[in-house]
């Protein structure tokens, strides 16, 4: 399996290619609570890049050694996330920059 480290808009990701599709793994310090649900945040650009690469799932390692995974949301899933207000638009750190949308996604413990 080919393995490489990529950085996507503040997220360090280990990317593996098994000859058929890409797999991602990343480290996130801690999940957090948002609207009464335990979630992790992924920005819109990283999710778009995952879709382009054909990534379907991201394995997540937390600092307390727990492991989890999320499925890359489909367009329909994203509409549901927006409808349920499980996102946040963060102000750009660049003058006149567009805000960055962070989607809050529920995860599955492994």
Image (tube, rainbow, N blue to C red):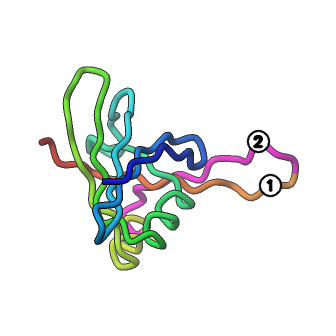
Q: x and y percent of residue 90 in the render?
A: 63, 47
Please tell me in which quadrant of the rendered image residue 13 appears: top left
Instruction: Tell me which secondary structure the magenta stretch mostly adopts.
Output: loop
Q: Label 2 to label 1, Cα distance in Å?
A: 7 Å
Q: Residue at x 38, y 27 (%)?
A: 29
Vertical comparison of 84 with 28: above or below? below
- Which region of the structure is painted magenta? 83-95
- Contact between marks 2 and 1 (CB within 8 A): the answer is yes
Q: Residue at x 52, y 47 (%)?
A: 6
> How many numbered discs, if any?
2
Q: Nearer the viewer, residue 2 or 60?
A: 2
Q: How dense is the environment of label 1, judged by Cα within 10 Å: few (below 14), some, or many (20 and up)?
A: few
Q: Residue at x 82, y 45 (%)?
A: 94
**Residue to which mark 2 is pinned:** 93
Label disc, if present, on residue 97 of the rendered structure: 1
Q: Quadrant of the N terminus?
A: bottom left
Q: How dense is the environment of label 2, judged by Cα within 10 Å: few (below 14), some, or many (20 and up)?
A: few
Q: x and y percent of residue 4 in the render?
A: 45, 47
57 drawn magenta: no
Label disc, if present, on residue 12 of the rendered structure: none
Residue pushed farthest top? 64
Q: Quadrant of the C terminus?
A: top left
Badge 1 element: loop
Please tell me in which quadrant of the rendered image residue 7 appears: top right
Badge 2 element: loop
Q: Residue at x 35, y 79 (%)?
A: 76
């Amino acid at each position: 399996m080919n393995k490489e480290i990529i950085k996507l808009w503040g997220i360090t990701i280990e990317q593996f290619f098994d000859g058929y599709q890409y797999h991602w793994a990343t480290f996130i310090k801690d999940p957090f609570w948002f609207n009464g649900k335990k979630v992790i945040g992924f920005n819109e650009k990283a999710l778009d890049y995952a879709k382009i690469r054909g990534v379907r799932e991201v394995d997540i390692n937390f600092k307390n050694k727990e492991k989890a995974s999320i499925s890359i949301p489909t367009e329909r899933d994203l509409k549901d996330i927006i409808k349920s207000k499980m996102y946040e638009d963060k102000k750009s750190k660049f003058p006149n920059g567009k805000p960055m949308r962070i989607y809050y996604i529920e995860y599955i413990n492994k």
